[in-house]
Structure formats: C-alpha cells, structure tokens
Image (cartoon, rainbow, N blue to C red):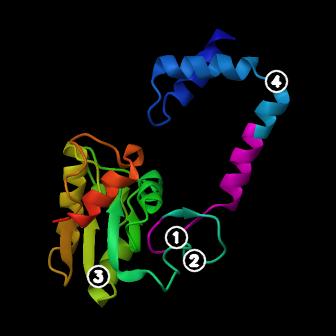
C-alpha cells in the first residue's frame, strides 16, 4: 500500500505549485475525507473535462458552445488587440481588473530557456495567421517577469517579427518573478496602462 501512496504523491506533485511534501499531505487528506465528498470532487473534475472546449483563436479553455470563447466572439471588444499570457489563470486575473478590452492569446505555459523544439510546445498558428491577415495589429505581452517569460516572449516576437503588428509589453508595475494570477487588480491596471 505504501507504493500506491508514493505513486499518488508523485502524480499530485506534478500539479503546478505543489511540491512532494504538499502532495503527501493531499494524499492523506484524500484518504481521510468522507467518500461522498471525494466522489463529488472527482465527479466535478470529470464533468468539467468532458464539457470543456478550447477556443480556436486564443486557446482559452471555455465552456460555451462554438469554436470561439465568449471573449473572442464578443464584438464589443477590440478584436485587433491581443494580450499574450501564459495561462488561463493569468487571463482571469486580467479580466478581473476590468482594464483590458481586447482579446487574449493563451500560450499554455512558458518555455524553459534551453527547451528544444518550442514550436511543438506552443502553437502560434492562430496568432500568426491573424497578424498576417491584418485582423490583429497590436500584440501586448503579459508574461511572467522571469527568464522563462522573457525567453517565451522572444520566441513569439520571432514568429511575428516581419508582420504588420505593433509589439508592446505590460508596464513593469509587476515585480520581477511575479505571477499574474496573484497580482491585484490595481497592479494589473497600472501595468496595462503603462505598457511599452
């Protein structure tokens, strides 16, 4: 049985922000909680996975019917402006600030500095195609202020370098090494208003 505890611990430690000790605590938590609560938790996870969609343009996880998410299909937003973020949680943090009225492009993650074949990890095709056609004329970067974020930004810039788009980045109201999902709305507002 200890081997199964170790296996579950290893799986949980793969979750973002969860280390081995935290994963071990989760294992024992799951073993102690009542079965109905555990069943409800796993049922919700399965239900969410079964009903999720990925937006054809921004790659955001969404739960509406159709190829585009509720943001990309909203004609009241500035369709020609795109804010590039690493994760869905970054998008949610910016949306909560109420400052950005353009679209997004969710990369899914940032690239490690020495990562090989980044084009197989991050799909930029919808962004490049929209930039080529002129339906996107400004790309704003809202990536983490760390080496991986800067490396990822360079990868995206290289893909759109010769296209007719303006490139800017959120102002540095965010401290180095900070994650967007933990920033408060006032900081996000300042960073977007002072983009360069």
* Residue 132 on image: x %, y %: 27, 85
- Distance, label 4 to label 2, CA atoms, is 39 Å
Q: Is residue 46 left or right of residue 3?
A: right
Q: Quadrant of residue 30?
A: top right
Residue nearest the observer in this picture, 167 or 157:
167
- Distance, label 1 to label 3, CA atoms, is 17 Å
Q: Please report the residue visible at 52 percent of the width from the left and 81 percent of the height from the top.
A: 74
Q: Earlier in the sequence, mark 4 or mark 1?
A: 4
Q: Please report the residue visible at 21 percent of the width from the left and 80 percent of the height from the top.
A: 165
- Category of crowding for the residue at label 2, using alpha-carbon neighbours closer than 10 angstroms: few (below 14), some (14–19), many (at least 20): some
- Distance, label 3 to label 2, CA atoms, is 19 Å
Q: Earlier in the sequence, mark 4 or mark 2?
A: 4
Start-end of magenta stretch: 41-59
Residue marked by disc 2 = 67
The local secondary structure at tag 4 comes to loop
Does residue 127 appear in this view? yes
């Amino acid at each position: 049985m200890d081997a199964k505890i170790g296996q579950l611990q290893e799986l949980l430690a793969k979750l973002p922000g969860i280390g081995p000790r935290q994963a071990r605590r989760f294992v024992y938590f799951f073993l102690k909680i009542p079965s109905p609560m555990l069943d409800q938790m796993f049922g919700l996870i399965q239900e969410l996975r079964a009903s999720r969609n990925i937006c054809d343009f921004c790659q955001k996880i969404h739960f509406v019917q159709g190829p585009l998410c509720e943001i990309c299909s909203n004609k009241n937003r500035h369709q020609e402006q795109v804010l590039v973020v690493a994760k869905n949680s970054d998008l949610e943090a910016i949306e909560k600030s109420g400052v950005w009225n353009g679209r997004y492009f969710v990369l899914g993650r940032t690239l490690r500095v020495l990562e090989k074949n980044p084009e197989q990890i991050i799909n930029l095709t919808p962004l490049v195609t929209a930039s080529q056609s002129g339906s996107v004329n400004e790309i704003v970067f809202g990536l983490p202020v760390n080496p991986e974020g800067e490396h990822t930004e360079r990868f995206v810039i290289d893909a759109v370098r010769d296209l007719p788009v303006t490139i800017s980045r959120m102002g540095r109201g965010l401290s180095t090494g900070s994650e967007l999902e933990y920033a408060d709305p006032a900081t996000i507002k300042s960073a977007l208003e002072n983009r360069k």
